[in-house]
Image (cartoon, rainbow, N blue to C red):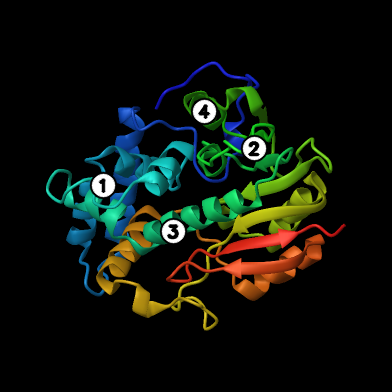
Amino acid sequence: MKNANGPVAQATRHDQLISHGAGSPDNYGDLLQSIQSIKSRLRLAGDLPGATVDQQIRLVDKLSAFELGRFLIENRGLNAYWTHQLVTYRPGTVSAGSISDLEYRIFEKLPVVLATRERFGIFRQQLQALLRSGLALASVPCGLMDELLLLDYELHPDVTLTGIDLDQLALNDASDLAQERGLAGRLSLRLEDAWTPNLKATIDVLTSNGLNIYEPDNGRVTALYRAFFDMLKPGGSLVTSFLTPPPTLSAESPWKLTEIDQESLSLQHLLFVRVIEVKWSAFRTHAQTLAQLEDAGFADIRFIDDRARMFPTVIAQKPF
């Protein structure tokens, strides 16, 4: 992952990140410690139906054999770089056998990855449709800001872009992508907390993905939506998303199981829940999300589901 000097603040605030840590997969000692810790936990937990302890241990070893797997082992979440790699990957780009079977299945088969990639496509469609001349667009947390930087601005040369994130590396990489896309001149990047942005009623369209799924506190998520509400101009639009609960956790799960490969779902559960214990486990229903957005002041709220109804997109308006 490249870093470049861009229009970003120089401080770092990794201690406040809730999606991933500041650790690097290149730190071999930390990686080995994380691997041994996971293996010890799995041995204590014992066998699962369909997965013995030995099979779970082998899965850890397979994960440690490729870069994304090592990052997940150490961080239990995704950073901007790996989120970008997963959502912009084109199925079929890598053939089975050219990489490890586990890495191939993560990119090509896991239901939550497919839902995330579909959600990314829905975001881009909706955001492109919202574009108008003179608008101010923002992304919080922005990551690489690809949902905005990959849009077509040919007919809208005066649109301005703002990215807010607590991860300095994400801001650096967003700056790189803006340079590649010829959009650096209209981009402003800010190292700020999503809950306390220093922008009030200045944004026409605000996009946010991936933060609420790491935050289990419903009150904190509603407060996040209020911060977004305050950033928007009257009549402005919020484009956001949320993870819905699986049937094993909630009778209100909206998952469409006919659209989900069950073998891949079982691997996903074993990998993310049992082995890695990922942090993106704050699930919410459509009704909960609707109530939170309304509590924050939003109106005209509509949902756009992915095929599996795992990772819905929400579009909400700030009233005039």
Give the class, few, some or many, for how many residues have Cα within 10 Å of label 3's Cα (few <14, many ≥20): some
**Dot 1 or dot 3, earlier in sequence:** 1
| Identity of the residue furthest to the top in this view | 5
As drawn, is 204 to the left or to the right of 207?
Answer: right
Instruction: Please name the amino acid that badge 1 sits on.
Output: Leu
Mark 1 lies on residue: 63
Question: In the rendered image of this protein, does residue 90 appear above or below residue 30?
Answer: below
Q: Which residue is drawn at 62% across and 34% down?
A: 166
Mark 4 lies on residue: 169
204 vs 95, nearest the viewer: 204
Instruction: Please name the amino acid that badge 2 sits on.
Output: His
Question: In the rendered image of this protein, does residue 186 appear above or below residue 81?
Answer: above
| Residue 296, visible in the rendered structure | yes
**Dot 2 or dot 4, earlier in sequence:** 2
76 vs 53, nearest the viewer: 76
Secondary-structure class at tag 2: loop
Q: In which quarter of the image is the C terminus?
A: bottom right
Mark 2 lies on residue: 156
Q: Where is residue 218 in the image (x, y as percent from the top left)?
A: 68, 63
In the rendered structure, are the residues bearing label 2 and label 1 in contact, judged by CB atoms less than 8 Å apart?
Answer: no
Mark 3 lies on residue: 118
Can you tell which quarter of the image residue 111 is in? Answer: bottom left
**Dot 2 or dot 3, earlier in sequence:** 3
Instruction: Please name the amino acid that badge 3 sits on.
Output: Glu
Q: Separation of disc 2 and disc 4 at Cα? A: 28 Å
**Dot 4 or dot 3, earlier in sequence:** 3
Q: Nearer the viewer, mark 2 or mark 1?
A: 2
| Identity of the residue furthest to the front in this view | 155
Q: Which of marks 1 and 3 is in front?
A: 3
